[in-house]
Image: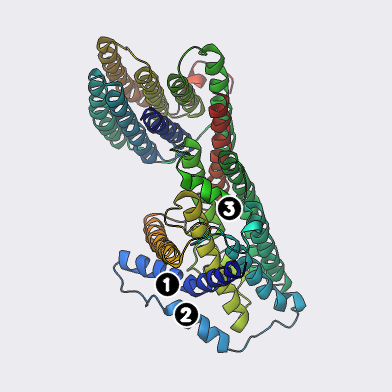
C-alpha cells in the first residue's frame, strides 16, 4: 500500500514538473494561461491525494483553495486583463526555447543534488517530493527570468508558488493558518500585479519590461 | 524452435495484412471527426492493389539506386516490425529484438529513401530529403535517449525482456516511464510524418516532407513505399503498446488460447491508437518546419529528465 501511494504521489509531482517545462516551452499567451491551469489542477489533485494518504483533512482545504483560486479566479482574471489590454500575440523570450529547456534540466539536476545530501535522515517519500518541488520552484524562477512580458512573468511567479505548496503538502505538519495566509497573499499580490499591468501599459505603451530598463537608463 | 518460427511468420504476415487497415482506420476517424463520410477503411488496400498493377515510370536520369530503394526501404522496415513483439514475447527473432537494432534498421530505411529522393535530381526530392534528414537528426538522438532511460528501468534493451519486465508488475508507476511515454509519442509522431510535423495528405510544396521525397515514384515502387509507411505506423504503435501497455501479450510457452487473446489485445491496441491519433491530428495544426526542432528537443529533454530522475531513485 505504501509503495503504491508513494508511486502515485511521485507521479503527480513528476506531472507537475512536466507542466512546468510546458510553461517554459509555451510561447502563446493563451497557451501559457491554459498550461498554468493544468499546472494548478495537478497541484489540486496532488494535494487531495496527500490529504487522503496522510489522513490529514486540512490538506483538503489546501486542495480546495488551489482549485478555486488557481484554476478558476486567477486564470479568468488573467484572461480578462489580456482581453482588455488586447494582447494575444506570441511571447518573445530572451533566450531561445532550446537553451531555456537545457537550463531547466540543469536546474532539475541542481535541485536533486542539493536536496539529497541535506535530507538524509528524512524518508524517501519526502525527499523525492522535496526535490521535485524545488525543481518546480526553480523552473518558475527561470520562467520569470526568460520572459520579457509582464503577464508571463507573473505566471512564472504563480507557478513558483504552486511549487512551494507542493513542497508544503509533501511534508507533514504545515499549519492551515500559514496555508491560508499564503493563498491570500498571493491573491493580493496578484491584484497588485493587475494594477501594475495597467500602469506600465499606460506609461510605456507596452508590457515588455525591457522598456522599464531603458527608462532607468540601463544599457541594453 | 519450429513453433517459434511459425509464430514469427504469423506475426510478419499479420503486420503486413493489418498495416493498410490501420491507415484506413485513421483516415476514417479523421473524416468522421470533420463531419465527412470518408472512404472505406479498406481503401488503402485498393490503392496498393491498383498501384501494383500500374506501370512504373522512371525518370530518364534515375540510376539503379532509384529502382532498388523502395524494396530496401520496405525490407528494412518490415524486418524491424518483425522484431517488435506484437502479440507474443518469445518469437524466433526475439533474441535479436533489441531496441537499438530497430532504431538502426529504421535509420537505414530513411537513409535509402533520402538517397533515392536525391537521385532523380528534382528540386522537390532535394527539399524533401533535406527536411527529412533534419527531422531525423533531431528524432534519433531523442529516441536513443528514451531507449536508454527505458533500458535503465528494465535493465536490458531487449524488447521481449523489457515487455516481460513491465508485465511482472513490480515496476509500479514511475515518473520516468511517464516521461518516456510522452517522449516516445513525440518521436513516433515525427518519424511517421503525422500532423504537427508533416501532413501525410498534402501535396503543397511548402509543407510536404515525406511526400516530396516520394514524388517521383509510381506504380509498384510507390506501392512498396506506401506499404512501408503503413508498416512503420504499425511498428511504432506496437512498440508503444509493448513497452507501456503490455497487457494481454502471450508469454513464453503460451497455449493457443493465450495467443488468441494476445492477437485480440494487439488489434484492440491498434484500434485505440488509431482513434487517438485521429483525434490528435484533427485537434492540432501543423507547425512550421523550423519549429520541429523545438518539438523534438522536448522529446530529447524528457528522455534526459527521465534518466536523471532514475539515477535519483537508484541512489535512495
Q: CA distance from mark 3 to mark 2?
A: 30 Å
In the picture, the quarter occupied by the C terminus of chain B is top right
Q: Quadrant of residue B257?
A: bottom left
Q: Are marks 2 and 1 in contact (CB under 8 Å)?
A: yes
Q: Is residue A114 visible?
A: yes
Q: CA distance from mark 1 to mark 3?
A: 28 Å
- Looking at the picture, how far across and down is residue B110, in whole percent? 66, 63
Give SS at disc 2: helix
Residues at discs 2 and 1 both on one chain? yes
- Looking at the picture, how far across and down is residue B88, in whole percent? 51, 61
Q: Earlier in the sequence, mark 2 or mark 1?
A: 1
At x 45% / y 20%, what residue is drawn? A130
In this image, A207 relative to B48: left or right? left
Residues at discs 1 and 3 both on one chain? yes
In the picture, the quarter occupied by the N terminus of chain B is bottom right
- Looking at the picture, how far across and down is residue A20, in whole percent? 44, 32
Relative vertical location of residue B213 with respect to residue A113 in this rendering, above or below: below
Residue position for label 3: B159
Q: Chain of mark 3?
A: B
Q: Quadrant of residue B134?
A: bottom right
In this image, B212 relative to A158: left or right? right
Q: Earlier in the sequence, mark 1 or mark 3?
A: 1
Q: How many marks?
A: 3
Residues at discs 3 and 2 both on one chain? yes
Q: Residues within 10 Å of mark 3 (few under 14, many from 20)?
A: many
Residue position for label 1: B24
Relative vertical location of residue A134 with respect to residue B25 in this rendering, above or below: above
Residue A203: which disc?
A: none
Q: Are marks 1 and 3 in contact (CB under 8 Å)?
A: no
Amino acid at each position: 500500500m505504501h509503495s503504491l501511494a508513494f508511486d502515485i504521489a511521485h507521479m503527480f509531482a513528476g506531472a507537475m514538473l512536466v507542466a512546468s517545462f510546458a510553461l517554459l516551452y509555451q510561447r502563446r499567451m493563451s497557451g501559457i494561461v491554459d498550461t498554468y491551469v493544468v499546472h494548478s489542477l495537478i497541484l489540486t489533485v496532488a494535494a487531495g491525494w496527500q490529504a487522503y494518504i496522510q489522513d490529514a483533512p486540512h490538506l483538503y482545504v489546501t486542495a480546495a483553495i488551489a482549485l478555486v483560486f488557481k484554476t478558476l479566479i486567477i486564470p479568468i482574471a488573467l484572461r480578462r486583463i489580456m482581453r482588455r489590454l488586447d494582447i494575444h500575440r506570441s511571447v518573445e523570450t530572451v533566450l531561445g526555447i532550446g537553451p531555456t529547456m537545457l537550463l531547466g534540466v540543469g536546474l532539475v539536476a541542481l535541485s536533486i543534488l542539493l536536496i539529497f545530501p541535506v535530507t538524509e535522515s528524512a524518508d524517501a517519500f519526502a525527499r523525492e517530493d522535496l526535490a521535485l518541488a524545488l525543481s518546480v520552484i526553480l523552473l518558475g524562477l527561470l520562467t520569470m527570468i526568460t520572459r520579457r512580458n509582464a503577464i508571463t512573468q507573473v505566471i512564472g511567479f504563480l507557478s513558483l508558488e504552486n511549487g512551494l505548496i507542493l513542497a508544503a503538502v509533501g511534508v507533514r505538519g504545515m499549519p492551515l493558518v500559514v496555508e491560508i495566509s499564503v493563498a491570500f497573499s498571493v491573491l493580493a499580490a496578484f491584484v497588485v500585479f493587475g494594477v501594475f499591468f495597467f500602469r506600465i501599459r499606460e506609461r510605456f505603451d507596452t508590457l515588455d519590461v525591457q522598456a522599464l530598463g531603458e527608462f532607468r537608463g540601463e544599457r541594453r | 524452435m519450429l513453433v517459434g518460427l511459425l509464430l514469427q511468420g504469423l506475426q510478419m504476415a499479420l503486420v503486413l495484412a493489418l498495416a493498410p487497415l490501420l491507415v484506413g482506420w485513421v483516415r476514417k476517424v479523421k473524416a468522421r471527426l470533420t463531419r465527412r463520410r470518408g472512404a472505406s477503411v479498406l481503401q488503402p488496400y485498393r490503392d496498393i492493389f491498383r498501384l501494383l498493377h500500374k506501370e512504373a515510370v522512371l525518370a530518364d536520369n534515375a540510376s539503379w539506386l532509384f529502382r532498388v530503394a523502395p524494396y530496401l526501404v520496405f525490407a528494412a522496415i518490415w524486418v524491424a516490425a518483425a522484431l517488435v513483439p506484437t502479440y507474443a514475447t518469445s518469437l524466433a527473432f526475439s533474441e535479436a529484438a533489441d531496441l537499438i537494432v530497430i532504431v538502426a534498421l529504421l535509420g537505414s530505411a530513411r537513409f535509402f529513401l533520402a538517397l533515392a529522393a536525391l537521385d532523380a535530381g528534382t528540386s522537390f526530392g532535394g527539399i524533401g530529403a533535406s527536411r527529412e534528414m533534419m527531422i531525423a537528426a533531431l528524432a534519433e538522438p531523442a529516441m536513443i535517449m528514451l531507449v536508454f532511460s527505458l533500458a535503465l528501468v528494465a535493465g536490458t534493451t531487449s524488447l521481449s525482456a523489457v515487455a516481460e519486465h513491465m508485465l511482472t508488475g513490480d515496476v509500479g508507476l514511475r515518473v520516468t516511464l511517464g516521461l518516456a511515454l510522452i517522449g516516445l509519442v513525440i518521436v513516433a509522431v515525427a518519424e511517421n510524418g503525422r500532423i504537427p510535423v508533416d501532413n501525410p495528405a498534402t501535396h503543397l510544396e511548402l509543407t510536404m516532407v515525406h511526400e516530396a521525397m516520394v514524388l517521383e515514384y509510381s506504380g509498384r515502387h510507390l506501392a512498396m513505399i506506401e506499404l512501408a509507411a503503413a508498416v512503420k505506423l504499425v511498428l511504432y504503435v506496437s512498440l508503444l503498446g509493448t513497452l507501456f501497455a503490455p497487457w494481454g501479450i502471450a508469454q513464453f510457452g503460451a497455449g493457443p488460447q493465450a495467443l488468441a487473446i494476445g492477437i485480440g489485445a494487439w488489434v484492440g491496441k491498434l484500434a485505440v491508437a488509431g482513434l487517438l491519433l485521429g483525434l490528435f491530428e484533427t485537434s492540432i495544426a501543423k507547425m512550421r518546419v523550423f519549429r520541429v526542432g523545438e518539438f523534438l528537443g522536448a522529446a530529447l529533454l524528457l528522455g534526459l529528465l527521465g534518466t536523471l530522475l532514475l539515477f535519483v531513485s537508484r541512489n535512495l
